[in-house]
Image (cartoon, rainbow, N blue to C red):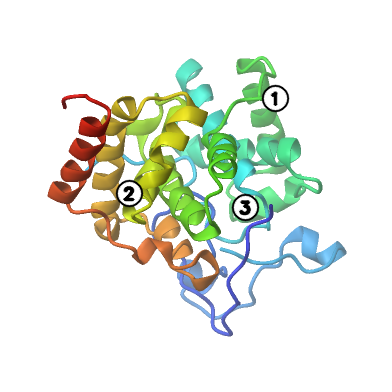
Amino acid sequence: MLLPLPPQSSKPVPKKSQSSKIVPSHHDPSEKTGENCQTKISPSSLQESPSSLQGALKKRSAFEDLTNVSFEMTHETLYLAVKLVDLYLMKAVCKKDKLQLLGATAFMIAAKFEEHNSPRVDDFVYICDDNYQRYEILSMEINILNVLKCDINIPIAYHFLRRYARCIHTNMKTLTLSRYICEMTLQEYHYVQEKASKLAAASLLLALYMKKLGYWVPFLEHYSGYSISELHPLVRQLNKLLTFSSYDSLKAVYYKYSHPVFFEVAKIPALDMLKLEEILNCDCEAQGLVL
């Protein structure tokens, strides 16, 4: 499924100072030069139809500077790109000034794997604001694939989330809320070690609690294979993440899911800590467990 895009404004949107990934934004050259000049055009848009422009815990930095422009790509591409960065950094050292190169190249590899029509190398040179040359991206691509031994068919949380939601017949708004919760974790190192299947189950479980759909919980437990008590610690962490999301310096995901096309689910308040504990206790009592 392709990501829906918000309507474009007639005015350029200022580039965010930080971002965990490519975010909706028109490139504003005056930020770099202090002068008015023409906006850069993506290489693909010169030859093809115009591309759609988009622009606490330790944060990721591999994707933070990719703020010029992006392309209409699937959620799977985003999740796989982040996973490739995680796996690469577990096995290799990357200098700080090459993290943007790593993030862009991982995104390119993920797009080749997931998309029907992936962007070209020159497009990724463009979204990096020409900080890197074409040969550097191609060299990093070879490096990543060698380090990972070309094993990039990796389970991602989004696949499990979509499967669980389909099994329990979740409506689109609740599924979108769970996607928002799950996507927020892409910005946090704390969740790198979590199993994709468990992270997806906990994200959907919290969404069910927030939407007062607790009667679906036993079905989620059945189809995910995780007992509710196994998911409770992770649910607490995710709810805390949502509680402080409005104070986070990385706003790309929050802004994205605040748009009407995503049902403005980011504006749904997180559960009060005491209320959440009450819900968790009720679940455990129903199963004859003690927290």
For disc 2, the neighbor class at 10 Å (few under 14, some 14 to 19, many from 20) is: some
Q: Quadrant of residue 55?
A: bottom right
Residue 193 on image: x %, y %:
39, 24
Q: Position of residue 129 (x, y in %)?
A: 59, 56
Q: Earlier in the sequence, mark 3 or mark 1?
A: 3
Coordinates of residue 121 in the picture (x, y in percent): 74, 45
Distance of label 1 from label 2 (alpha carbons): 44 Å
According to the picture, the residue beneath numbered tag 1 turns out to be 142
Q: Quadrant of the C terminus?
A: top left
Q: Nearer the viewer, mark 3 or mark 2?
A: 2
- Residue contact at pointers 3 and 2, CB within 8 angstroms: no
Q: Secondary structure at mark 3?
A: loop
Question: Marks 3 and 1, Cα distance to the nearest angstrom?
Answer: 20 Å
Horizontal side of 49 relative to 96 (left or right) equals right
Q: Is residue 64 left or right of residue 150?
A: left
The residue carrying mark 3 is: 130
Of residues 249 and 125, which is closer to you in this image? 249
Crowdedness of circle 3 by 10 Å Cα count: few (<14), some, many (20+)? few
Say which mark, if any, is on residue 227.
none
Regarding residue 258, the answer to whether it shows in the image is yes
Amino acid type at image mark 3? Asp
User: Which residue is drawn at the image coordinates 44% and 58% (left, top)?
Assistant: 252
- Mark 2 or mark 1, which is nearer the start of the sequence? 1
Q: Crowdedness of circle 1 by 10 Å Cα count: few (<14), some, many (20+)? A: some
Residue bearing the label numbered 2:
209
For image coordinates 63% across by 63% down, the residue present is 4
